[in-house]
Image: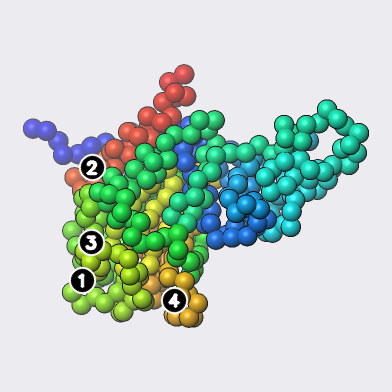
Amino acid sequence: MTSSLIPTLAGHYYTDPSIFAAEQELIFEQMWFCAARGEDIATPGAFRTVDVGRESLLITRAADGAARAFLNVCRHRGAKLCAEPEGQVKRTFRCMYHAWAYDLDGKLVAAPNLVKMPDVDRVEYGLRAVHVREWLGYVWVCLAERPPSFSDDVMGACVERLGDLDSIERYGLEALTVGRRIRYDVKANWKLIIENFMECYHCSTIHPELVHVLPEFAGGYAAQYYVGHGAAFGRDVQGFTVDGSAGLRTISTIAEEQDRRYYAITIKPQVFVNLVPDHVIFHRMYPLAVDRTIVECDWLYLPEVVASGADLSRSVELFDRVNRQDFEACERCQPGMSSRAYADGGVLVPSEHHIAEFHRWAEGRISPIRGK
């Protein structure tokens, strides 16, 4: 008789610093990574600094309106160019150490006695650029010399989940605006957070508010389990809010069949997208250590809704509670990953079997180093 149980990753995959280092090198530094919301760098000279793998990145907008991303390192002696998490410059980024300055395109434009140093090429010794794409209103970066296909890896994840690209583009994420942003400092490995988001076996246990709004989640099957499937709102539920009361203005471009439904998408390695009729909840993970992950969550609404001063609290509170419930569970799991009881891992029940594919993917990504 064939067992319905599938083993998980062994516990050391969540605790071993060498595995995390391999993930930094072969996952976060090789794949497309969602770094920032485009409106965070809305004007030329606006910037954010973001940790991607082992690198600090400087994300900004150039004078021509295009997003740019650079390694956040002065080319002179290696000082961190921008220490602040965000800010605004007029025309140049200036290193505090020896005052080397770079324009918004990364070119070296000034330094003390630069005219007396003809061997310092202003382009060659400019900031080191990384690949950039803007999609869904977010800035995606890739540190790889030859980035993978954005269409296959990022857009393809949405097609794999929803069945086609139109299904997410109808929400017009690039035209929405951030109504609320919350940063969570989660004391857990990033894979535990991904696994949690992908399954709903836990939903009836720790998410009473979510199960009230989406009753089918009580059965343990997550919305991501079925291609193109969206979880239907309960009969007595008016909107995706903490108490099921009416939401805000519906995004008019969504399809009729998308109304009163919730869709969830995982875009590896660090993005979760949650689609509901009147807003979008967009998570970005920033893994900082083997047992620490920053999760930045945006609640996106129609600009006129935010501008009107509408009360967003009930829709924000629903997923804020879900996040806190999930992250508490992940933090409860993290110490157990070091236990001898989990040395060989655990098991996946049938409603979680799709997580095994994620485990195979994660193992496969780091195998070039693990196999040495």
Name which of mark 2 and mark 3 comes first in the sequence: 3
Residue 163: where, in percent of width, then height?
25, 49
Q: Are marks 2 and 3 in contact (CB under 8 Å)?
A: no
Tag nearer the camera, 4 or 3: 4
Left or right? Give the position of 115 relative to 20.
right
The image quarter in which residue 282 lies:
bottom left
| Amino acid type of the residue that numbered disc 3 sits on in the rendered structure | Ala
Judging depth in this view, the residue of 44 and 82 nearest the camera is 44
The residue carrying mark 3 is 231
Which residue type carries mark 4?
Val
Residues at badges 1 and 2 in contact (C-beta under 8 Å)?
no
Q: Secondary structure at mark 3?
A: strand
Image coordinates for residue 128, horizontal then vertical, percent: 66, 37
Which residue is labeled 4 in the image?
A: 305
Q: Amino acid at mark 1?
A: Gly
Residue at x-position 23% and y-position 66%? 256
Q: Are marks 4 and 1 in contact (CB under 8 Å)?
A: no
Residue 217 horizontal/vertical position (percent) = 22, 61
Residue at mark 1 to residue at mark 2: CA–CA distance: 26 Å
For disc 2, the marked residue is 353
Q: Position of residue 55 (x, y in %)?
A: 60, 40
Q: Image point 46% across, 37% down: which residue?
A: 31
Q: Quadrant of residue 260?
A: bottom left
Label 1, label 3: how far apart the Cα atoms are: 9 Å
**Residue for badge 1:** 234
Q: Residues within 10 Å of mark 1 (few under 14, many from 20)?
A: some
Of pointers 4 and 1, the one earlier in the residue sequence: 1
